[in-house]
Image (tube, helix red, strand yellow):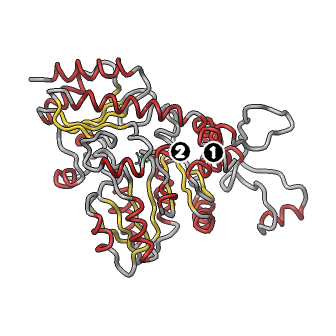
């Protein structure tokens, strides 16, 4: 399967058929697996034989999902988790111990920020934040205890980019692991491991599921690194449910066609917004006006499904805009078939101080749209009428 194209891998990688010769893979709803005899049980536990023992360790549906994701990301090995946050936490906790230090981009997902600032310090693990545009900041932040660089690109919700190749080469010099949350781009648009990252983490809840149905996560990397993650995961239990593994593996079959449409809808919406007189600033990686447009073209295949913009009249007009939307959903989720509008300052990023928000590019009038798969004419029509009515 390795030499096939993205779509083919995503559709044709399957676990072995059972004796029923089913075409679509069944759901292996089982907590444990039978041993052939006492010797087989001993060999499995001694890791002298390969096979399933217990679904906290492995399950055919979860394995199909994760093996396929590895093929798509260009990773040697991986582990699926019950949610994106389980993936973030386990991918960090597997490699850091008391006294260690992590350098992270300031604009990380809200719960990742809580892990770094509230939870890790309980175990004596410290962090330093680097601003998204401060490439030199990564090297400056390195101490003798730094074990990991962690970042997201494009960032949420400001859509700033980090040069994966450059940050990875700084890390390499110092023997530091690079962990990239690739949730916004998906493996279809960007492959951090191919650009030098060591670990890729995903919230499969977003574009990978793509229909707002369930939670899931993944951690991918070299076999020796994933063995460490497996040790942590086996014994702490963030395992994915087999049902979720089954759905998410099916979801990967359609990721490429869905992402093509998410991206073309988002680009069209971004172009429309750029010309609207009630809009101040539009950010979209594949718009030429994006300050890092060249980098976007270098490390992403297309611009992604998210567009952010600032409504001309700031906070009050931004709120009115959301209330006047008739079709778009108001929700904190993203990566759904349905277009979703979010006001980050009052919801997803409300735990940050005003100063912290501004430092990651979240002004009070900033609106984030996760562009769905509805017909783009209807998306633009709804956004247009809400913008026009929001004018005071
Ligand atoms: C949603 C999200 C997460 C968390 O994933 P869950 O599946 O909700 O736990 C992590 N990182 C990014 C960038 C996200 O958008």
Q: Which residue is mark 2?
A: 216
- Note whether ligand 1 is within 8 Å of mark 2: yes
Marker disc for residue 57 = none
Q: Please state the horizontal and vertical placement of residue 320, each as a whole percent of the image.
A: 18, 26
In the image shown, does 288 or 314 lie closer to the viewer? 288
SS for callout 1: helix
Identify the image quadrant of residue 165. bottom left
Q: Please state the horizontal and vertical placement of residue 124, each as a whole percent of the image.
A: 39, 74
The answer to whether 41 is drawn above or below residue 70 in the figure is below
Mark found first going from the N terminus, 1 or 2: 1
Q: Residue at x 44, y 26 (%)?
A: 373
Identify the image quadrant of residue 252. top right
The answer to whether 19 is drawn above or below residue 81 in the figure is above
Whether residues under marks 1 and 2 lie with C-beta atoms below 8 angstroms apart, the answer is: yes
Q: Residue at x 25, y 49 (%)?
A: 291
Front tag of 1 and 2: 1
364 displayed left or right of 270: left
Q: Residue at x 62, y 40 (%)?
A: 10
């Amino acid at each position: 399967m390795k030499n096939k194209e993205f779509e083919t891998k995503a559709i044709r990688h399957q676990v072995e058929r059972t004796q029923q010769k089913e075409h679509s893979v069944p759901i292996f709803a089982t907590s444990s697996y039978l041993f052939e005899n006492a010797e087989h049980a001993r060999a499995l536990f001694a890791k002298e034989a390969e096979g399933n023992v217990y679904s906290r360790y492995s399950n055919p549906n979860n394995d199909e999902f994760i093996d396929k994701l590895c093929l798509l990301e260009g990773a040697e090995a991986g582990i699926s988790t019950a949610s994106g946050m389980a993936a973030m936490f386990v991918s960090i906790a597997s490699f850091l111990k008391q006294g260690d230090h992590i350098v992270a981009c300031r604009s990380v997902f809200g719960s990742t920020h809580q892990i770094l600032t509230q939870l890790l310090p309980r175990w004596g693990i410290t962090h330093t934040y680097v601003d998204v545009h401060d490439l030199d900041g990564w090297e400056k932040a390195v101490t003798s205890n730094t074990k990991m660089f962690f970042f997201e690109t494009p960032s949420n919700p400001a859509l700033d980019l980090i040069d994966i190749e450059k940050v990875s080469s700084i890390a390499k010099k110092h023997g530091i692991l690079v962990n990239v949350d690739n949730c916004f781009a998906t493996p279809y648009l960007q492959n951090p491991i191919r650009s030098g990252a060591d670990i890729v983490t995903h919230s499969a809840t977003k574009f990978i599921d793509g229909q707002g149905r369930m939670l899931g996560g993944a951690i991918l990397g070299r076999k020796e690194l994933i063995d460490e993650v497996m040790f942590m995961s086996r014994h702490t239990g963030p395992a994915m449910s087999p049902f979720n593994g089954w759905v998410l593996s099916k979801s990967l079959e359609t990721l490429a066609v869905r992402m093509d449409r998410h991206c073309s809808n988002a680009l069209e919406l971004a172009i429309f917004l750029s010309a609207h007189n009630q809009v101040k600033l539009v950010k979209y990686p594949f718009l030429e006006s994006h300050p890092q447009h060249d980098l976007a073209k270098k490390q992403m295949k297309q611009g992604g499904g998210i567009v952010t913009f600032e409504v001309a009249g700031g906070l009050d007009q931004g709120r009115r805009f959301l209330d006047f939307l008739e079709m778009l959903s108001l929700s904190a989720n993203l990566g759904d078939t349905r277009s979703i509008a979010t006001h980050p300052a009052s919801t997803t990023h409300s735990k940050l101080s005003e100063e912290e928000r501004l430092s990651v590019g979240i002004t009070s009038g900033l609106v984030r749209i996760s562009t769905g798969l509805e017909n783009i004419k209807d998306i633009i029509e709804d956004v247009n009428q809400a913008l026009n009515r929001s004018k005071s």
